Amino acid sequence: MKAFYAGSFDPFTIGHLSIANRALSLFGELIIGIGYNESKRNEHSIEERILHIKKIFEGNSMVTVFAYHGLTAEIAKENGAVVLIRGVRNGIDFEKEKELADINLEVFGMPTVILPCEPQYSYVSSSMVRELTHFGYDVSRYIPKTNN
């Protein structure tokens, strides 16, 4: 079964990697979709994010990475996914993701699996990493190593 994990992934963190690996073990094949979000100020270009994530999963033919425009559930269906993957760090995340999951099921018939993050990653977010980077802090421990 193919799952679709969407986000802006700016940057793709160790928390994202944990969710992706868990989804991969549950569903066998994973599409990582980087959505264009005009309302977010992105630090890295779409091309940089795609390249970084592809390098992380290099050699794993069960992971596909691409950018997309449009509604996530539609893109997921068009690419053969049967489920959406969402990660949550806390109750606030859960409420927002449950709302989206309900809409995606109602409108598109696309179920969502919500995976809570592992406790050691509950404070890691892309915005936190961007903020620390902006002020010159080393964030390498929050960013997955690439395979080359």
Image (cartoon, helix red, strand yellow):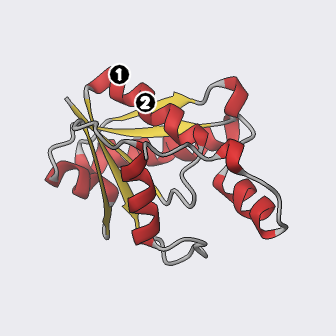
Q: Position of residue 46 (x, y in %)?
A: 43, 70
In the rendered image, the quadrant that contains the N terminus is top left
- The vertical placement of 49 against 123, above or below, is below
Q: Residue at x 75, y 40 (%)?
A: 123
Q: Does residue 51 appear anywhere in the picture?
A: yes
Front residue of 106/117: it is: 117
Is there CB contact under 8 Å for labels 1 and 2? yes
The percent coordinates of residue 83 (x first, y second) are 28, 36
Task: Give the residue displayed 57% in from the left and 73% down from the top.
Answer: 42
Q: Tell me the residue that label 2 is attached to.
A: 21
- Give residue 34's quadrant in the image: bottom left
Residue type (three-letter) at the residue carrying disc 1? Ser
Pick whichever, 56 or 36, lies toward us. 56
In the displayed structure image, the side of residue 77 where residue 116 appears, left or right: right
**Residue 12 shown left or right of residue 140 in the figure:** left
Left or right: where 51 falls relative to 137:
left
Q: Secondary structure at mark 1?
A: helix
Disc 1: which residue: 25
